[in-house]
Image (cartoon, rainbow, N blue to C red):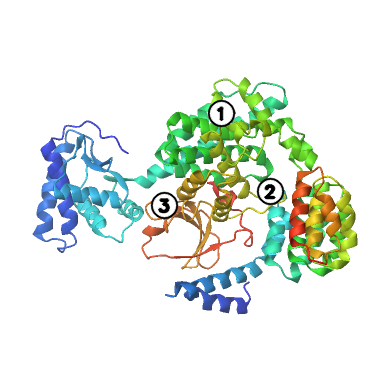
Amino acid sequence: MEPSATAKRRDALIPLLKDPDGDVRAAAAAAMEKLEGIQSLDEVIEQLKKGGVAAKVRAIYALAEIGGDKVVAPLVYCASRPEEEIRGAAIDALGTISNRSTLQVLVERLKDNNSGIRARAIRALGNFRDPALVPVLLPFLDSGDGLTDVEAILSLSAIDNGSLQERFVELTRSPNAATRVAAATALGVLRLA
Amino acid sequence: MITPKLAKLTLADAQRLASIFSGLIRSTTLYPPGNPALTRPLQDLHALVESHLKTGNSIRLGLADELLFVEDHLFVTATPPVEELANIFASRKIDAMIIMQGVEAAEIFRLAQLLSDRNMTTDKIVRSLETDGKSHLLIISAEDTEEKLLHEAGNAYQMALESIRSAFIDIEEHRVPSSERLLAATRQFTDIAVQDPLVVACLSMIKDFDNYTFNHSVNVGVIAMALAAHMKLDRQRIEEAGIAGFLHDIGKTMVSKAIINKPGKLSTIEFDEIKKHPEDGVKIIEKMSGISRSVGEAVLGHHLRYNRKGYPEWAKEMELSDLSQIIAIADCFDACTTLRVYQLPMPPATAINLMKGLAGEFLNPEMVNSFAKMMGKYPPGTLLRLDTNEIALVWKANPGNPEMPLARVIFYANGDPVENPVTERLAERETATRIVAVLNPVAKGIDVGEYFRQA
């Protein structure tokens, strides 16, 4: 059943969808979307429990959109699932919400057997902008696979204080074009030491 | 359009019938029922109809190429009343009206009243005639034609999907894939695309996560055909665009499944493998019967990019065909709007905006503009909140009114889901309805593709 507070807000917002002023209509629509997002949490978690792989992946991305503390536990659970599709999507979602309580879960995924999943974990950790992660991500600069090194360059360039400049210059000479692109990009955004 | 059938009604009687009926519709708004200004023409009309129906089963009147016809008489030079009737039919999107044996004057009068009421949608008129329990008047609306086209397109989609699936299996089992069914599906799609490219375009919103490769191949084909038809290419070129789209990724059958199904980005070595698929595709297509050379060229060039900085590198000096560039656009749009293990589907309008950003480098700018124009302000698959708080899913652009597409309401104003959503023209609602927001289906846990698949 709809909580009375939400029902009251809906009742106030719905007539505003017909307001003669366009800004009012837009604000009311945006508020309605937020309210519905909060209300849909239980439904999304249900999809996560009962749906097929596609429904689960969609539900994981939906949780990232909804955000808030309640979505953390189901996402952490999914990040350790055996299905690569579910694990990968959950890592992306954890990166989006960037809740510090999930840092260790993501660090753990850096050891994943699948390089695609490792790359997603590196990218997700980059979103935390935490200097403590520099030594954790540093080894991936040497992978030379044009995948995890790329993600590590991009994540580290957002975190590092400029100390990695020489490493990035070195990586501009990588045989992999994708690595050279990332290194060039990093040199443009890296803070000056 | 309905083809006028041969009948014995004379030209003078046909003209009289149309004129009296047109006048009757107008008069119902001016005089109360029972007024001689209504009863006299109604009696005349009924007598005329009855006399004809003694020798024929029905009288058919409607529009052919926007001109009014009554039986086999087409009014190329119309009198004002005839023109007025044509306008009434056109504005209501009525293709034809059939008057059958046994029709009563009261039925004709009721229909005239309904047609004179501007607030009456065609759908309501049809329903109202049905509710009255009469079966001597039949309205055939253009929307019926649209529904029919959508149905036919859905059948062609299934056929294409099955053909692609078996082509992929054939290759895995070292056989030359058969092209017969694929060509048949393409011909069917082309028939529809030349009538209405938008009907074909909206099928690209059918998504199947578990069968991405087949589903993506068919979607690229249907988008390519819709765009080719919208660009007014000739029939053969539309068919070639479709086949090239269906087969654009067939070379991926030669790539390891571990790479194809990898849940994330690819390493350099893996990507180098993927980059071989256009060439491998051409090798497969060359062995298939009935497929023109330009299809192979289109497949070879679909990743070359507009600026020729794509792959295969050796083909950069080759002429980039219009088909390659159409396939590149279709490929990009479907990839962006589809849920993948590593990617949220973009709302269609967002994908088109992204494509506009890629125009001039990756994609042909003129074709991107053409594509954006075809898909409309609210492309198929866009989720809308209406000012009634209903949530509607755009089914098809409405070229006559880009602000008000054809859509299906999928959630009522109170938030309850609609069990069997039906397509409606938002512009033709009884009470004017406004679109207040484009919504993010992901946050609502809505699988847009599922609605299109079920339809």
At horizontal 49% and vertical 31% (from top left) the residue drawn is B239
Which residue type carries mark 1? Val
Residue B44 lies, in percent from the top left, at 10, 48
Q: For mark 1, name the chain.
A: B
Report which residue position mark 1 lands on.
Answer: B295
Q: Residue at x 23, y 55 (%)?
A: B110
In which image quadrant can residue A62 be found? bottom right
Q: Along the horizontal axis of the image, is B2 left or right of B76?
A: right
Q: Please report contact status of discs 3 and 2: CB closer than 8 Å, yes or no.
A: no
Instruction: Estimate the x, y position of residue A74 in percent, counting from the top left.
Output: 78, 62
Residue pointed to by mark 3 = B398
The subunit letter for the residue under badge 2 reads B
SS at mark 1?
helix
A100 relative to B90 in the view: left or right: right
Question: Which tag, 1 or 3, sits closer to the chain's start?
Answer: 1
Number of callouts? 3
Q: Amino acid at mark 2?
A: Arg
Front residue of B358 and B103:
B358
Q: Quadrant of the N terminus of chain B?
A: top left
- Residue bearing mark 2: B340
